[in-house]
Image (tube, rainbow, N blue to C red):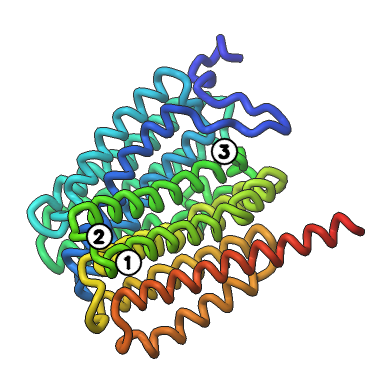
Amino acid sequence: MAADNPRGALFRVITPDQHSRVTNVELFFDLVFVFAVTQVSHTLLHHFTPLGAVHVTMLFLALWWVWVYTAWVTNWLNPELTPVRILLFLMMLGGLVLSTTIPTAFEGRGLWFAIAYATMQVGRTAFWLLATPAHRTAVRHNAIRILVWLSVSAVFWILGGLAHDEARLWFWIVALTIEYISPAVRFWVPKLGFSSIEAWAVEGGHMAERCSLFVIIALGEAVVVNGATFAELEWTASNILAFVSALVGSIAMWWVYFHKGAEAGAERISKSTESGRLARLAYTYLHLPIVAGIILTAVSDELVLKHPSGHSDIRTIVSTIGGPLVFLVGTILFKHSVRGFLQLSHGIGIIALAVLCWFAPDLSPLWLSVATSAIMVVVAVWESVSLGSKGEEAEAH
C-alpha cells in the first residue's frame, strides 16, 4: 500500500492497546507557545481595560485554536517523518511571527498577525489533505471540509488586518465565530454534507497528553514570570509571602488538574468508542477555560508581587479571583465529561471564590492572593482524599 501511495506513509501506525507517544519535535514546536502565552499575559497586564480584555481574549482564542488544530493533525500524521517535521518547523516560524505581533495586533501589526494566523491554519490543513492517500476517502473529505471553513475565515482575518480600530475587531469576531462553530456543526459543506463522528477517531492517549502539556506550558510560564518578577524586587516580608502564595497557587492548580483528572481523561478517551466526540468536547473546547484561568492567575501573581499592600483594585480582584474561578469551571466541566459526575470539591471551591468577591475590596492584594491559594489547596486536598477513599472502597469490594 505504501509503495502504491507513498503519501499514505506519512500517517502514524496505530498499535492496539498502545498509545502513540508525544515526539520530541512536537515538544520543540510547543516551545513557541511558551513565548506566546507570555505575550498574552503581558498584553493583558498592560491593557487591563474592558476593551483590552476583549482584544486579549480574541488573541488567546486564536492562539489556542491554531495550537489545538495542529495537535489534531499530528495525532494522525507521524511527526517522526521528515515532511511532517518540516511542516512543524514552518509552523514554528509562523508561531513566532504570531507571538511577536500579539501586543500590537490591534494596532500597527494587525495584518502581520492575520497573515501568520491564516497561513498556519490553511497551510497546515492543505498539507494534511495532500498527505492523505486517495483511498482514505473519509479522511480526505474531512480535510476538504476543514480547508473550506478555514479558507472562509482566513478572508475575514485578512480583511480585519487591513481594517482599523472597531472594523478590525468585528472582522476578527466573525473569523473566530466561523472557526469555533465549525466543529460543532461537524464542518458541513455543500455536497459533502456533515462529517461523521466515526471519521474523527483519534489516538486518545496522545491527544490527552498533548493537551496536558499545554497546561504545563501555561503553568510553567506563570512560575517563570513569578520568579523573574520576584528577582527584581526588594525582598520584604510581604513580597516573600506573595511569592510563596503564587507558587502554592500554581502547585494547587497542577494538583487539581494532574493528580486525578488528566489520568482519568487519558484512560477514558483511550477506551472510548467515540474518541472523536470526546476529544472535541473535553480537549478542544473545555481545555480553553482551564488554560485561560492559569493565564489570568499569572497576571494576578505579577500584580500582587509588585503591589502587595493597600486595597485591592478592580484589576487585582478580577484576576486574583477570576483566574482560579475560570480554571475550576473548566476543570469541573472537563472532569464531568470524562467521569460523568460533577466533582463536589470543585463546586464548593467555585462557590467559595464567588463569596470571596464580596470581601475582596476590603482585603489587600497579598491577603486576597493568600485566600484564593488557600481555597485551591482545599479543593486539591478534598478531591485527593475523596477519590482516594472511593478507590479503597472499590478495592475492598
Q: Give the answer, above or below, for where 178 lies relative to 352.
A: above
User: Distance from label 1 to label 2 (Cα)?
Assistant: 38 Å
Looking at the image, tell me whether mark 2 or mark 3 is earlier in sequence order: 2
- The secondary structure type at the circle numbered 2 is helix
Task: Say which of marks 3 and 1 sits in front.
Answer: 1
Kindly report the distance in space between the C-alpha atoms of the residues bearing marks 2 and 3. 31 Å
Residue 24 point in image, percent of width and height = 45, 27
**Location of residue 66 with respect to 51 vertically, above or below:** above
| Image quadrant in which you'd find residue 91 | top left
Few, some or many C-alpha atoms within 10 Å of disc 3 (few <14, some 14-19, many ≥20)?
many
Secondary-structure class at tag 3: helix
* Residue located beneath label 2 in the image: 172
Q: Secondary structure at mark 1?
A: helix
Label 2 crowding class (10 Å Cα cut-off): few <14, some 14-19, many 20+? many
Question: Badge 3 is on which residue?
Answer: 206
From the image, state whether disc 2 or disc 3 is nearer to you: 3
Position of residue 81 measured from the top left corner of the image (x, y, whole percent):
46, 19
In the image, taking residue 27 as reference, residue 328 lies left or right, namely right
Residue 293, percent from left and from top? 40, 64
Question: Outermost residue, left direction?
Answer: 108
Q: Amino acid at mark 2?
A: Trp
What residue is drawn where x is 42% and y is 57%? 291
Q: Are marks 1 and 2 in contact (CB under 8 Å)?
A: no
User: Which residue corresponds to the image point at 17% horizontal and 55% vertical from the top-left?
Assistant: 103
Please state which amino acid type lies under the numbered disc 3: His
On the rendered structure, is 270 left or right of 371? right
Mark 1 surroundings: few (<14), some (14-19) or many (≥20) residues within 10 A: many
Q: For the C terminus, give its image quadrant.
A: bottom right
